[in-house]
Image (tube, rainbow, N blue to C red):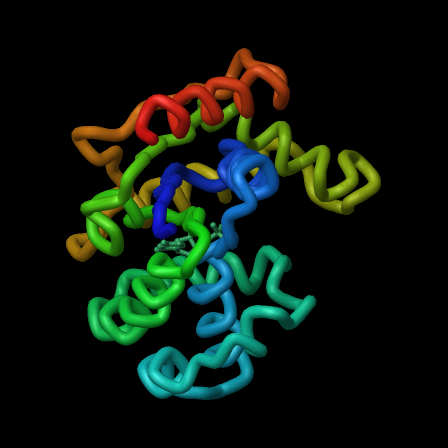
């Protein structure tokens, strides 16, 4: 059985949580495609040329546990604007999408570019303020050494870059089900996502 779920949306909208819940509920494999761009960004910060880092990416590179920092997120969103880097990562993602037993991929361009024929497409979003608040709390709140305004500015800057780039900008596919999680609990957001996947099956 092959069944592909594409989940797109901006940073900290709840894509990861929803994707993991969908994968667990239906027994699908899950790929967080942001990790591919983060792994490339990480290697660029270490001095590698972006295109070489992208074209030699291996599964073990995305399992590194130092990919979640703000510096890596920033580097990821910069390399993600390079068309050749995106092109070098397409096959990795499409191979994954063909996984026997079903696959969930989350990112920015899964329903539009990577898997336009996905069986189910979701676009998970929330206001920039809500997303910045969640990210700030995740970082540890006041104890993190940063402040909410700084996190909000970073969220907005990353949104602008992801939505404004010429190649594969962040946009909802025409046939995506949009879930705005600004005023939803995690359980309610997951429930909507499960309903959308069931409706597509
Ligand atoms: O989702 P995450 O925050 O880990 O993604 C890091 C960056 O990678 C994003 O800001 C975006 O620029 C890029 N990205 C992308 N396409 C994807 C996934 C992530 O351009 N499918």
Residue 176 coordinates in the image, percent (x, y):
27, 29
Residue at 52% over, 24% down: 129
Indicate left or right for 124 with 187 as reference. Answer: left
Q: Residue at x 16, y 54 (%)?
A: 166
Q: What is the quadrant of residue 10 in the picture?
A: top left
Give the answer, above or below, for where 187 lies relative to 102: above
From the viewer's perspective, is 76 left or right of 79? right
Quadrant holding the C terminus: top left
Q: Position of residue 37 (x, y in %)?
A: 43, 65
Residue 146, by quadrant, is: top right
Q: Tell which of 37 and 21 is nearer to you.
A: 21
Residue 12 in view here: no
Q: What's the residue at 56%, 32% (across, down)?
A: 132
Specify the quarter for ligand 1.
bottom left
Residue 139 at least partly seen: yes
| Horizontal relation, residue 15 to residue 176: left or right | right
Residue at (28, 75) in percent of width and height: 88
On the image, the x and y values in percent for residue 89 come to: 32, 70
Task: List the single residue furthest toward the top.
Answer: 183
Please indicate whether residue 183 sits to the left or right of residue 199 in the image.
right
Res. 25 image quadrant: top right
47 relative to 92, above or below: below
């Amino acid at each position: 059985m092959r069944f592909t779920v594409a989940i797109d949306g901006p940073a900290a909208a709840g894509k990861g949580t929803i994707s993991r819940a969908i994968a667990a509920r239906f027994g699908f494999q899950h790929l967080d495609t942001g990790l591919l761009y983060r792994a490339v960004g990480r290697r660029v910060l270490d001095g590698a040329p972006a295109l070489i880092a992208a074209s030699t990416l291996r599964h073990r590179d995305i399992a590194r546990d130092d990919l979640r920092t703000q510096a890596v997120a920033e580097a990821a969103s910069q390399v993600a604007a390079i068309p050749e880097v995106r092109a070098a990562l397409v096959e990795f993602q499409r191979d994954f999408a063909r996984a026997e037993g079903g696959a969930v991929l989350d990112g920015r361009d899964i329903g539009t570019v990577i898997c336009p024929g996905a069986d189910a497409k979701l676009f998970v979003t929330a206001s920039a303020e809500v997303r910045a608040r969640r990210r700030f709390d995740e970082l540890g709140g006041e104890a993190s050494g940063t402040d909410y305004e700084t996190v909000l500015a970073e969220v907005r800057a990353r949104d602008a870059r992801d939505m404004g780039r010429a190649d594969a900008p962040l946009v909802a596919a025409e046939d995506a089900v949009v879930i705005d999680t600004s005023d939803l609990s995690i359980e309610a957001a997951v429930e909507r996502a499960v309903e959308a996947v069931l409706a597509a099956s």
